Structure formats: structure tokens, C-alpha cells
Image: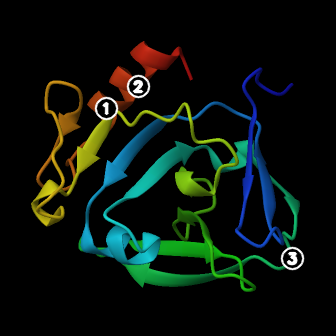
Amino acid sequence: MKPERCKTGGCQCGAIRYELIGMPKMLYACHCSDCQKQSASAFGMSLIMDPREIEISQGAERLQSWDTQGDDGAIKRCSFCPECGTRILHGSDNPLEQVSIKAGSLDDTSDLRPIAHIWLKSAQPWISVDPGLYQCFDEEPENLDGLRKLWQAQHGDN
């Protein structure tokens, strides 16, 4: 059964389409240099999902990926549309681990409110984040459990 607030998204050219059939586990804004580069903007937004709750409804066979390594040595699998280059999601080499939908690829982003801003030490100097409104971290938090609990308290149990 699909959640009432099922979200859809896809790439810029429309070749890849997806549907979120579960509720997000968390949303944060990341200001690291990798997210700035891949989003071609000041930060990226990551919507954390269970991979079993994402259905690629169009173009699954076309979705391409490449692997990079994080500062911690973990593999990050970056999936994108080969036609327009839009980044769709990030995961790992473990298909059961949670993935990060690139939130800007959603059709409707009007209700997105991140729970935290991470890697603020890499943020553009003109970015100002109010620590009274968001959890703020100079780097990536060692443990995301506290943020997940805060997200759940604000958005219901996931």
C-alpha cells in the first residue's frame, strides 16, 4: 500500500521516472565540495530512503552509475540519467543499505524542510544557516541516529 503522500520524481529530460512508495527516513542539506559540484549549486539535499521503497517506473534499464570513495573509505554509488546527466540517487555497494534520493529530482519540492545542514565548514561564505532552526555540523555527524529520531518526531514514525 502506498503512503498518502507518495512522491514522484525523475531526471531533467524525463527518461528516468521514479516513485517513493515509503516515507523518507530523513532529509538534510549537505555543503561538502562533492555535493556542491554534483548539484552545480551551493549545496545538495539528500532524502534518505529504504531502497525497497523506491520504484523506478520508467527507464530503469537506462539508469547508469559510477562509484566514488568517501573520506571514510566507503563506496558511494552515484546513479544518474545517461541522457541528461541528472543525479537521481546515491547508495553503496550494499543493495540493502539506505539510499539518498537527490531531493531536487522530486517533482514537487515545496514541502521539503531539511532537519540538518552538514559540512558547513565547506559552505559558501554567503550561506547563513540559523542554528535555532536546524541542527548544524561542521562536518558529517559521526552518528545519524539523533537526526533520524528528530525527523521521526517531526514527521511521524517511519
Q: Which mark is on residue 147? A: 1
In the rendered structure, are the residues bearing label 3 and label 1 in contact, judged by CB atoms less than 8 Å apart?
A: no
Q: Earlier in the sequence, mark 3 or mark 1?
A: 3
Helix, strand or loop at mark 2: helix
Callout 1 amino acid: Leu
Helix, strand or loop at mark 1: helix
Check disc 3 and report the residue beneath it: 61
Q: Which residue is drawn at 62% across and 57% down?
A: 105
Q: Residue at x 87, y 70 (%)?
A: 59
Give residue 31's position: percent from left, percent from top: 26, 60
Near-viewer residue (10 or 52): 10
Check disc 2 and report the residue beneath it: 151
Give residue 12's position: percent from left, percent from top: 70, 69
Give residue 136's position: percent from left, percent from top: 17, 40
Asked whether the viewer can see residue 155, the reply is: yes
The image quadrant of residue 150 is top left
Is 126 on the left-hand or right-hand side of 47?
left
Q: In which quarter of the image is the N terminus?
A: top right
Sort mark 1 into few (<14), some (14-19) or many (20+) by Cα contacts within 10 Å.
Answer: some
Give the answer, above or below, for where 56 lies relative to 93: above
Is 35 on the left-hand or right-hand side of 88?
left
Give the answer, above or below, for where 104 lies relative to 152: below
In the rendered structure, are the residues bearing label 2 and label 1 in contact, judged by CB atoms less than 8 Å apart?
A: yes
Q: CA gap, disc 2 to disc 1?
A: 6 Å
Give residue 56's position: percent from left, percent from top: 82, 58
Q: CA gap, disc 3 to disc 2?
A: 33 Å
Helix, strand or loop at mark 3: loop
Q: Residue at x 86, y 76 (%)?
A: 61
Q: Earlier in the sequence, mark 3 or mark 2?
A: 3
Q: CA gap, disc 3 to disc 1?
A: 34 Å
Give the answer, above or below, for where 60 lies relative to 120: below
